[in-house]
Image (cartoon, helix red, strand yellow):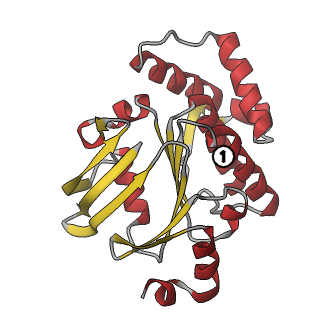
């Protein structure tokens, strides 16, 4: 589903990714862990097509397409979702209207009919209930006045509405308390643990992996994958640290 081969990338002339290779098959969840500055968020931004991140070598194939040749909105329409470490606030824009426009823009890109107002509200209520988020919150401006946990739950509602084929989730556990962590973890499982879908979960800590159990755990250090294992590798990292495990 996602195949990254010898990917190199830089920002502002500084190399960050230095020959990263990774394959995620349909139906799999892969976790990326690693120290600060290793390139984890850069990997997510490169996959999402964020401006300023220059790919200098290698290739990325997504669902049979050359991902790097697609514009960000084309990547989204193809089924790629990028969850941010710090979801942005958009004052003056209703969250529910933002979500409807995003969903229908993607549907248009795929040649599908737009959702009617009634169809969209039914879908939004269903996904908000899944993440235990009050629908009244979605009537507010995007993320304005939301706590860290509310922002992450709202982002998972967005993921549920867009229903992507593949999700790249950058530190989705950041800012979550114990209850929100469980809710978000269960939401990821309900939305993405399905045949034909895949997840790349970027995290510093093992705690989210108690809920979203990965098929594989990778250690990213100095811009490349240096170790791969099963879920037990995350526990080892938690106990021994990156330096000892990745050495």
Answer yes or no: is residue 142 visible: no
**Residue in the picture at 37% in, 32% down:** 73
Residue occupying the point 54% across, 39% down: 197
Please say whether residue 121 is visible from this viewpoint.
yes
Measured along the vertical axis of the image, is residue 196 above or below residue 188?
above
The quarter of the rendered structure image containing the N terminus is: top left
Residue 28 position (above or below residue 235): above
User: How many numbered callouts?
Assistant: 1
Position of residue 203 measured from the top left corner of the image (x, y, whole percent): 56, 65
Query: Residue 22, located in which quarter of the rendered image?
Result: bottom left
Image coords of residue 84 (percent x, y):
52, 52
Q: Nearer the viewer, residue 204 or 148?
A: 204
Disc 1: which residue: 188
**Left or right: 178 with respect to 96?**
right
In this orientation, which residue lies closer to the viewer: 77 or 215?
215
Seen in the image, is 207 located left or right of residue 88?
Answer: right
Give the image quarter of residue 18. bottom left
Q: Nearer the viewer, residue 94 or 245?
A: 245
Q: Is residue 86 left or right of residue 16?
A: right
Give how far across and how far down residue 232 sits, in percent: 63, 73
Name the image quarter holding the C terminus.
bottom left
Vertical order, 162 against 143 (above or below): above
SS class, disc 1 = helix
Residue at screen point 65% across, 38% down: 191
Q: In the picture provided, is 183 more to the left or to the right than 47? A: right
User: Vertically, is 220 above or below 22?
Assistant: below
Residue 89, image x, y percentages: 56, 45
């Amino acid at each position: 589903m996602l195949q990254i081969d010898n990917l190199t990338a830089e920002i502002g002339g500084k190399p960050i990714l230095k020959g990263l290779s990774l394959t995620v098959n349909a139906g799999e969840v892969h976790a990326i862990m690693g120290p600060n500055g290793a390139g984890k968020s850069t990997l997510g931004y490169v996959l999402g097509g964020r401006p300023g991140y220059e790919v200098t070598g290698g290739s990325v194939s997504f669902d049979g397409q050359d991902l790097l040749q697609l514009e960000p909105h084309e990547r989204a329409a193809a089924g790629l979702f990028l969850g941010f470490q710090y979801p942005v606030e958009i004052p003056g824009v209703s969250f529910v209207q933002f979500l409807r426009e995003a969903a229908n823009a993607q549907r248009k890109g795929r040649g599908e009919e737009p959702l009617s107002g009634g169809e969209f509200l039914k879908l939004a209520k269903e996904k908000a209930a899944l993440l235990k988020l009050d629908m009244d919150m979605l009537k507010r401006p995007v993320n304005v006045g939301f706590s860290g946990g509310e922002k992450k739950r709202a982002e998972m509602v967005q993921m549920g509405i867009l229903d992507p084929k593949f999700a790249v989730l950058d530190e989705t556990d950041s800012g979550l308390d114990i209850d929100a962590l469980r809710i978000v973890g269960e939401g990821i499982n309900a939305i993405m643990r399905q045949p034909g879908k895949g997840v790349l979960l970027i995290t510093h800590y093992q705690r989210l992996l108690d809920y979203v159990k990965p098929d594989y755990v990778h250690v990213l250090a100095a811009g490349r994958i240096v170790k791969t294992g099963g879920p037990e590798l995350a526990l080892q990292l938690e106990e021994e640290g990156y330096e000892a495990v990745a050495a």
